[in-house]
Amino acid sequence: MAKVAVVTGSNGLIGQATCRRLMQSGWTAVGIDIGAAGTGNWPHYGCDLADLSAMDATLAAIERDHGLIRALFNNAGVYHSEGEWLEADAEQFDHTMAVNVRVPYFATQWVAKRLIASGEGGAIVNTASTAGLNGSTVVEYGASKAAVVNMTKSLGRHLGRHGIRVNAVAPGLIKTAMGARVPDTAKQRAMASALGRAGEPEEIASVVDFLMSDAASFITCTTIEVSGGA
């Protein structure tokens, strides 16, 4: 039986790298992205995940088409870098929280219910950020990722007795479209990291692959920082 892993935000560079890596590891990787078309040779489902009804319908379609979802990478996220905190508005704040916190919360709930009903274990991996650990000049983004770190630990404790592990990866500066929009001061701090460079999307994908694998069978409630020592 195929091992099905869903990757949200699959058209982004981290999403693409993770789909490729999971396929190499024997998973059936399935992508979800707001874009109608996919970017790789894996099944793609277009969906605005902020619409929870559409998200539920999309996850149900994936289960119907491919089987039980055994792993979920909650990778989709938004980053509003325009302007300073004093100019941020409620719409920007609410959109950030909806995509970065509410979507992984309810996507995890959907997948966990099916795993529990099936009696199968599984793995959830969330995308946090070093901004959620250290703070951010983009305040609502940092706050949303701090919520992801806390949610990861809390959900892991709830779901562990069902054999479902919940972990997060906290990237630092990565060579992605979102990374290119990071303020210059934050980029300078990241480049002064122990390794002195930005990370590659594949370096995030490898950690996600590990956390979904049996090699991480005793790891849950944990956020792994992947930042080059920033």
Image: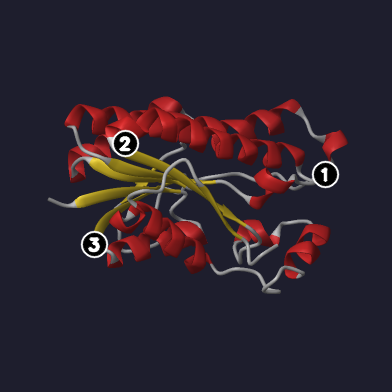
Depth-wise, is mark 1 or mark 3 nearer the camera? 3
Can residue 107 be seen in the rendering of this structure? Answer: no
Q: CA distance from mark 1 to mark 3?
A: 43 Å
The residue pinned by badge 1 equals 83
Query: Residue most toward the front?
Result: 218
* Alpha-carbon span between mark 2 and mark 1: 35 Å
- Type of the residue with mark 3: Gly
- Which residue corresponds to the image point at 20% horizontal and 37% vertical from the top-left? 120
The amino acid sitting under disc 1 is Gly
Q: Is residue 122 left or right of residue 225?
A: left
**Residue that label 3 marks:** 26
With 181 as the anchor, is 201 left or right in this view?
left
Which residue position is annotated with label 2?
59
Q: Quadrant of the C terminus?
A: bottom right
Residue 201 point in image, percent of width and height: 52, 65
The kind of residue on which mark 2 rests is: Leu
